[in-house]
Image (cartoon, rainbow, N blue to C red):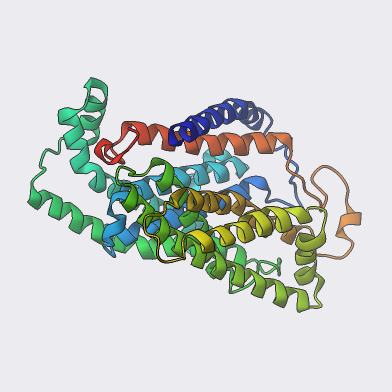
Amino acid sequence: MKRFIKSIVWLLAVIGFGVGIYGMYLRFTTGHRLADYGSYIPWGLWVAFYIYFIGLSAGSFLLSTLVYVARIERLEKIGKLALFTAFGCLVAALLSIWMDLGHMFRVGNVLLHMNLNSMMSWMGILYSSYFAIILVELWFALRVDLIETAQTGNSGSAAFAKFLSFGSTDTSKEAKARDHARLRVLGTIGVPLAIAFHGGVGALFGVVQARPHWNSGLMPIAFLIGALASGGALLTAVVYIWGPDKNKQQLNEIMKFLGKIVLALILFDFLLEIAEFLVGLYSLAPAERLPLEAILHGPYWYVFWIVHFLIGVVVPVIILFARAVPKGQPDKYVGGSIAFACLLVAVTFIAVRFNIVIPAQINPEIPGLEYAFGGPGLKFTYLPSIMEWLVAAWVTCFGVLLFLVGEKILPIVKDDNREVA
């Protein structure tokens, strides 16, 4: 079954990547002309995908600290998988926001011409630091496995592993202990960094006073909890399909443990969402109330009610309550059900990000502005164009293929821990 799922994921990723190339061609040859966003709604689908992938990355990384910082033994075998998932999602996030830039090849200016009073400059600093921490931590987590693969693997994988080990050959107990100590230090540094950079993304929205829907002190916290819920859900589904499954009972316990964490995070995130909606709908200020009304019963009501609420909250919560919470029957294998529920959460969380980015921009800051000027981009409605969807598909499939190829050629999970190598 897992072999079949892996084949389907490979097939969908290759097809999406191939089809998305046409969107990338249009993006580079026509710029933003084929996009539906404009001057009044400047942030569209790619910004939603950017905060979606950043959340997945931060959530996966923070769960990896349960292994390297909190030293929870039952999760020890999935630490590298969590780090590599965080890395793949981070690359997809950076590609998403790069597509949204007006001058794509000036992206380095955010670091070369820093303004420390700007949230954007701080995001550049935090992203660079976070990227470096993930790479260094991943290398220390893989170092011994790379050396062993270089010595025992076939010619291709051995040469690649030898290159990535950068001349390191020490696999002694003392060297492994030093690696663990370094991983603990790096993970400890990474925790506040991941919280800061993803909370910073929330702050990037929260400090925009012109958009009352975003301008809330709760926004950074909601971003962080959403990241943990969606990233934890993605990691749980990934562990079931690509994780160590030789010991089925052990995998079952890991899935139950992760399922309980995801369940608690989904409920907490939904509680924050309810609070935001109740306070916003009570307001008489149109700028505060109208975006929420658009989410609940606007033209795209189904994005909230069906995609997010029904498929992304109600169904997974019922499954997780039924499969991950009950005690007893330790031999009952529930990993597949938990993985399915978590996959629903991870995939449908894009609806949450979409409802954060778009509805807040549909209300004119000045009454009558929608009638004052006319022309391309001067409108307060938005529906992603085919080009935008194709580019989003390409970026998503690039991240998935990066993970799939890396999982194949790197010793993320040892073959002797797999049922299907």
Q: Is residue 283 above or below residue 84?
A: below
For the question of whether residue 118 can be seen, the reply is: no
Q: Is residue 119 above or below residue 28?
A: below
Q: Nearer the viewer, residue 44 or 8?
A: 8
Give the x, y percent position of residue 109. 49, 47
Q: How many marks?
A: 0
Give the x, y percent position of residue 186. 28, 58
Q: Residue at x 66, y 72 (%)?
A: 274
Q: Nearer the viewer, residue 204 or 409?
A: 409
Q: Within the image, what quadrant is residue 220 found in?
A: bottom right
Q: Is residue 339 above or below residue 289?
A: above
Give the x, y percent position of residue 313. 61, 60
Classify residue 241 as left or right of residue 143.
right
Q: Nearer the viewer, residue 221 or 415?
A: 415
Classify residue 159 as left or right of residue 214.
left
Classify residue 33 as left or right of residue 267.
right
Q: Residue furthest top?
A: 155
Q: Is residue 132 above or below residue 278?
A: above
For the question of whether residue 233 can be seen, the reply is: yes
Q: Residue at x 60, y 54 (%)?
A: 349
Quadrant housing the C terminus: top left
Q: Residue at x 27, y 36 (%)?
A: 415
Give the x, y percent position of residue 35. 72, 39
Classify residue 343 as left or right of residue 3.
right
